[in-house]
Image: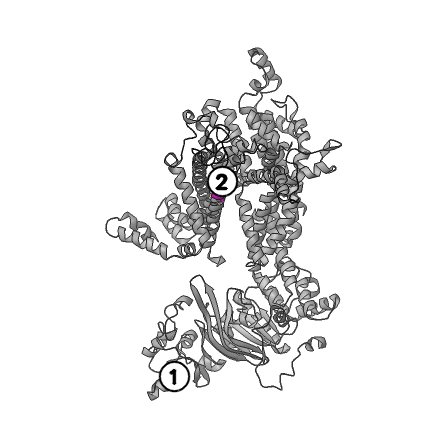
């Protein structure tokens, strides 16, 4: 167990170093950082002085090391555009993104997995065909289009439709921003006010839909794969009940690969959130990142990259540990597996 | 197998027959059979062909040219579709905020979307297959490096990588230059995020083939490894590669649209489908729904059709499912 | 064990002379994109109480499908398209899933080919045994566990009380097949369908497993339908043999007669040698060609393109089983009508 965790941790650190390297290269070699910081009228001497003060003339390894040390301490430099520490900006924006992602992940998982199991078990059923059709449309509609459609339906047209129908079919939902937020320490949450929760509905559905269909399709295909295996046939041949075979034997085996890929998907929700944030003007990290790209605000770009990389690595680590709990083969074949990889 | 491969080289007599034979075999195959049996797939194929055709011949098909600034008149802006009050016969589906016809812009926009899509898939395919072949055939350190890079790459979703590359290009390239080369930047940005799938598929097959006796034999008689791979590994992976490519095309079109929607893809002067939707989304409450809805529907229909084709192709090429 | 033997509701089978399993004119079809393939065609046989029937044939001959049909586990789109299957005189091929489920494991057990894939890798073998016992009996958790340990000991697993809590991957292939046999036998079914039970095993272990299967089935009084392509296993184990080719039984009879005095040219070829007057042993020692695919079964006798003794009639009409000596064979060579010159 400990060897496994250590190995995974080392891999995670390797990935973080790679991501850090990219972020660092961005920082130092894309454009001239001095140019980005000072005005037109700065003299060459002043520039050189600043250059020395920032340590930009030091050897590469030293600079990279310093960058990493600072990054670990949460120091990502100062935004060219906002003139404020990037860490502050990110800390302000992070709760919005994380709350949105969390709700979306929850939706995607708790709707996607049961739908996948159902369509896997009832392959040719009518409802399965309906789910599959919906999922295909879900995969084909770009996230931003889904968001815009939802805004049109629930924000713009709902009143017209309701008055045409004579009763309230569609609720009017907020389509812009986070609503009212409450400060809990440094964390600002929208969960505590009604307007905050209402504001979450459309963005989280938008963000969840694509991941949900992906998870559903994944669970379905894994389920079909598992149902074809010998041990499922053997379980049936032993006269076990359908319930025991489907949910006891098949579902648990389906979970092993599903956990891995679902974990990755949930990670990408945080990244995909930037599209949703743009559509709904949700004040999260993604919106910050898109502005940064448009304005070539390198420190913000680099630190966003580091943050996303960090989230991914953490999620991967958790997924690997879960995997380890579910699959006894990993537990026992630790040494063998280590030798193979 | 080797004999079969050599035949097309020996052209002249038999070549025509061979083409007829291949054609006949295709129409006799299960793939063609399952194609003719599924109306949904036929419709998808027709829709895809219409989009490809309209994009290829956009200047001939489109009623007006939205890229030609001389024909655009700001006075024509926000004209609704022809069947609504205030519609204009010149603009079947209405106009956007700059006075560009929506229908024409959709046609030209599809041209950009599909152009970027095909080019980036091709780029990813060539890159992925090459790296996969190298990785699988040579193994060892090269393999380890390529596969680690793939792992790190997979850590990030395609859209993020594309955004990053696009952002980088903006930072490095002068503004004027960027507006000239945006097409290549986009292709690079989108294509770079797709290579991993091809590489993994091809690598697996290459590793299997590498140890087969005929490959060993070919190696012994001094045929260069590159040629061996080309002859023996590629034919084996063409099926899966084709399926990945089809599905990637759909994702590439979505990614391009998303980038344009986010305002970092195509420049505003040459609008793609995503740009149009973005323009429409700036006026969601003012009632100009057509600016968003028509390009949105066009995008969704195109992607759905390509996705359906990809799904069908995967099932048709996979005998296990039947 | 007394509570287990009371499970079978039938009257004492020794008194009735009807066979335990009776399969009549079984036909299994596989619809595919281009039409329907007939995988098993007009197959009839029976298995008596406590008897071992070997079913041999090349892969694709329909023997495994026949086994799956008996236990009601044909995978869609395969389905029974005709004929019937009776267990103790009761028809079982048309039962609902739930009714058939109660028969599976309790009255008909099954052993699969590959012990490496037959056990669920995520559960301990103890859990897989107890869940089967709990499903079919009134035993409580503790009783089921005791019974499971007893079974593991019976199939020759050392330190059963400890190993019961281990996962399948901690067992060797041979040991796993023992566990699979314990699972198939744990409710004392009266018929075991063993589908290639030794094919995936190491040669050195095959004999042990076959001996174990044979001994346990005798002790438990279970009849066996032993599906295999290994004639050695059949000769050693079976009481009677059915030889299948392209979805049909071409010869069926007592094991000694089929092995030593095979009548059908295919069986003869399968045995590797046969003393037929006027034919060199080497002609028949091996059969040229391959079994036809299901979508290209030739007219007449399916074996005719490969048969060294085929004549015109074999290419026109399909022969049915008819008594030849001690066995039954489906071959025009033995048709009385030919010899007397009266064709039907």
Q: Is residue B182 magenta?
A: no
* Disc 1 to disc 2: CB gap under 8 Å: no
Instruction: Specify whether C134 is left or right of B73.
Output: right
Specify whether residue B283 is in view.
yes
Query: Residue A115 location, x and y as percent?
Result: 61, 52
Q: Is residue C278 above or below residue A266?
A: below
Q: Secondary structure at mark 1?
A: helix
Q: Is residue C244 above or below residue A249?
A: below
Could one spot residue A319 in this view of the protein? no
Mark drawn on residue C334: 1
Residue C260 pos. (x, y %): 45, 81
Q: Look at 44% across and 49% down and name the residue there.
A: B43
Tell me which segment is drawn in magenta.
B295-303
The local crowd at label 1, few if under 14, some if 14 to 19, many if 20 or more residues have their Cα within 10 Å, is some
User: Residue B246, position in %: x, y?
Assistant: 46, 45
Predominant secondary structure, magenta span: helix
Comparing B62 with C243, the one in front is: B62
Spatial distance from mark 1 to mark 2, Cα to Cα?
A: 72 Å
Q: Residue furthest left?
A: B13
Closer-to-camera residue (B308/A338): B308
- Horizontally, residue A311 falls left or right of residue B313, namely right
Residues marked 1 and 2, same chain: no
| Mark number displayed over residue B201 | none
Q: Is residue B300 magenta?
A: yes
Chain letter belonging to callout 2: B
Tell which subunit mark 1 falls on: C
Residue B299, numbered label: 2
Most foreground residue, A39 or A319 = A39
Determine crowd level at label 2: few under 14, some 14-19, many 20+ residues with C-alpha closer than 10 A.
Answer: many
Secondary structure under tag 2 reads helix
Q: Nearer the viewer, mark 1 or mark 2?
A: 2
């Amino acid at each position: 167990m400990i060897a496994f965790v250590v190995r995974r941790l080392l891999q995670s650190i390797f990935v973080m170093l790679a991501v850090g390297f990219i972020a660092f290269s961005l920082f130092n070699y894309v454009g001239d950082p001095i140019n980005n910081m000072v005005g037109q009228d700065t003299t060459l001497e002043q520039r050189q002085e600043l250059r020395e003060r920032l340590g930009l003339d030091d050897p590469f390894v030293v600079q990279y090391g310093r960058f990493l040390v600072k990054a670990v301490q949460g120091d990502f430099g100062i935004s060219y555009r906002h003139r404020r520490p990037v860490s502050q900006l990110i800390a302000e924006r992070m709760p919005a993104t994380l709350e949105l992602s969390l709700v979306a992940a929850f939706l995607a998982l708790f709707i996607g997995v049961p739908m996948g199991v159902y369509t896997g078990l009832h392959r040719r059923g009518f409802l399965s065909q309906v789910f599959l059709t919906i999922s295909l449309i879900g995969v084909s509609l770009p996230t931003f289009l889904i968001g815009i459609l939802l805004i049109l339906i629930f924000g713009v047209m709902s009143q017209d439709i309701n008055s045409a129908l004579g009763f309230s079919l569609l609720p009017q939902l907020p389509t812009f921003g986070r609503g009212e937020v409450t400060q809990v320490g440094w964390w600002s949450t929208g969960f505590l006010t009604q307007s905050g929760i209402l504001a979450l509905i459309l963005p989280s559905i938008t963000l969840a839909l694509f991941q949900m269909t992906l998870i559903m399709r994944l669970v379905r295909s894994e389920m079909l794969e598992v149902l074809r295996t010998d041990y499922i046939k053997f379980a049936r041949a032993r006269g076990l009940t359908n319930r025991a075979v489907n949910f006891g034997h098949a579902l648990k085996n389906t979970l092993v690969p599903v956990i891995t890929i679902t974990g990755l998907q949930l990670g990408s929700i945080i990244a995909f959130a930037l599209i949703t944030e743009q559509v709904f003007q949700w004040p999260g990290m993604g919106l910050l990142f898109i502005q940064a790209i448009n304005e070539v605000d390198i420190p913000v770009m680099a630190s966003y990259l580091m943050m996303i990389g960090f989230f991914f690595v953490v999620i991967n680590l958790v997924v690997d540990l879960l995997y380890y709990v579910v699959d006894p083969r990993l537990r026992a074949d630790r040494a063998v597996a280590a030798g193979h990889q | 197998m080797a004999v079969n491969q050599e035949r097309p080289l020996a052209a002249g007599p038999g070549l025509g027959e061979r083409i007829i034979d291949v054609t006949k075999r295709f129409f006799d195959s299960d793939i063609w059979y399952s194609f003719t049996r599924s109306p949904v797939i036929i419709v998808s194929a027709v829709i895809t062909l219409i989009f490809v055709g309209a994009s290829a011949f956009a200047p001939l098909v489109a009623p007006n040219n939205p890229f030609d600034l001389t024909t655009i008149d700001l006075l024509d802006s926000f004209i609704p579709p022809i069947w609504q009050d205030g519609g204009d016969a010149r603009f079947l589906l209405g106009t956007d905020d700059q006075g560009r016809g929506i229908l024409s812009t959709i046609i030209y926009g599809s041209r950009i979307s599909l152009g970027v899509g095909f080019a980036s898939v091709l780029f990813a395919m060539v890159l992925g297959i090459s790296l996969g072949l190298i990785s699988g055939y040579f193994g060892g350190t090269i393999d380890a490096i390529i596969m680690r890079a793939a792992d790190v790459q997979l850590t990030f979703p395609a859209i993020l990588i594309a955004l990053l590359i696009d952002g980088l290009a903006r930072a490095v390239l002068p503004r004027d230059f960027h507006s000239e080369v945006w097409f290549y930047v986009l292709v690079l940005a989108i294509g770079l995020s797709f290579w991993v799938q091809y590489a993994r598929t091809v690598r697996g097959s290459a590793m299997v083939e590498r140890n087969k006796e005929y490959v060993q034999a070919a190696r012994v008689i001094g045929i260069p490894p590159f040629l061996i791979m080309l002859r023996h590994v590629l034919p084996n992976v063409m099926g899966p590669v084709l399926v990945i490519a089809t599905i990637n095309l759909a994702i590439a079109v979505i990614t391009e649209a998303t980038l344009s929607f986010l305002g970092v893809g195509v420049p505003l002067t040459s609008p793609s489908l995503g740009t149009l939707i973005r323009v429409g989304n700036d006026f969601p409450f003012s009632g100009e729904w057509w600016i968003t809805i028509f390009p949105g529907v066009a995008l969704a229909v195109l992607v759905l059709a390509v996705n359906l084709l990809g799904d069908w192709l995967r099932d048709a090429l996979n005998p296990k499912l039947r | 064990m007394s509570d287990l033997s009371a499970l079978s509701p039938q009257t004492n089978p020794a008194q009735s002379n009807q066979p335990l399993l009776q399969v009549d004119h079984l036909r299994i079809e596989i619809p595919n994109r281009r039409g329907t393939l007939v995988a098993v065609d007009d197959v009839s046989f029976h298995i008596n109480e406590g008897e071992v029937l070997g079913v041999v044939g090349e892969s694709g001959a329909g023997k495994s499908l026949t086994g799956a049909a008996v236990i009601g586990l044909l995978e869609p789109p395969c389905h029974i398209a005709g004929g019937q299957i009776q267990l103790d005189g009761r028809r079982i091929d048309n039962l609902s899933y739930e009714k058939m489920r109660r028969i599976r494991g309790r009255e008909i057990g099954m052993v699969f080919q590959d012990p490496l894939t037959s056990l669920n890798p995520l559960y301990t073998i103890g859990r897989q045994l107890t869940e089967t016992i709990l499903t079919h009996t009134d035993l409580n958790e503790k009783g089921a566990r005791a019974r499971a340990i007893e079974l593991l000991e019976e199939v020759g697993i050392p330190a059963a009380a400890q190993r019961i809590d281990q996962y399948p991957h901690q067992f060797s292939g041979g040991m796993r097949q023992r566990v699979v046999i314990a699972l198939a036998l744990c409710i004392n079914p009266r018929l075991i369908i063993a589908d290639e039970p030794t094919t995936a095993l190491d040669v050195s272990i095959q004999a042990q497993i076959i001996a174990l299967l044979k001994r346990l089935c005798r002790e438990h009084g279970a009849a066996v339908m032993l599906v295999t392509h290994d004639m050695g296993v059949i000769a050693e184990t079976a009481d009677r043999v059915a030889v299948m080719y392209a979805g049909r039984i071409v010869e069926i009879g007592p094991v000694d007669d089929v092995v030593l005095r095979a009548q059908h040219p295919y069986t003869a070829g399968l045995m590797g040698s046969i003393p037929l007057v006027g034919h060199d042993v080497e002609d028949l020692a091996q059969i040229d060609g391959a079994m036809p695919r299901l979508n290209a079964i030739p007219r007449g006798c399916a074996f005719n393109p490969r048969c060294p003794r085929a004549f015109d009639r074999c290419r026109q009409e399909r022969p049915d089983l008819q008594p030849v000596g001690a066995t039954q064979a489906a071959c025009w060579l033995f048709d009385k009508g030919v010899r007397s010159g009266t064709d039907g």
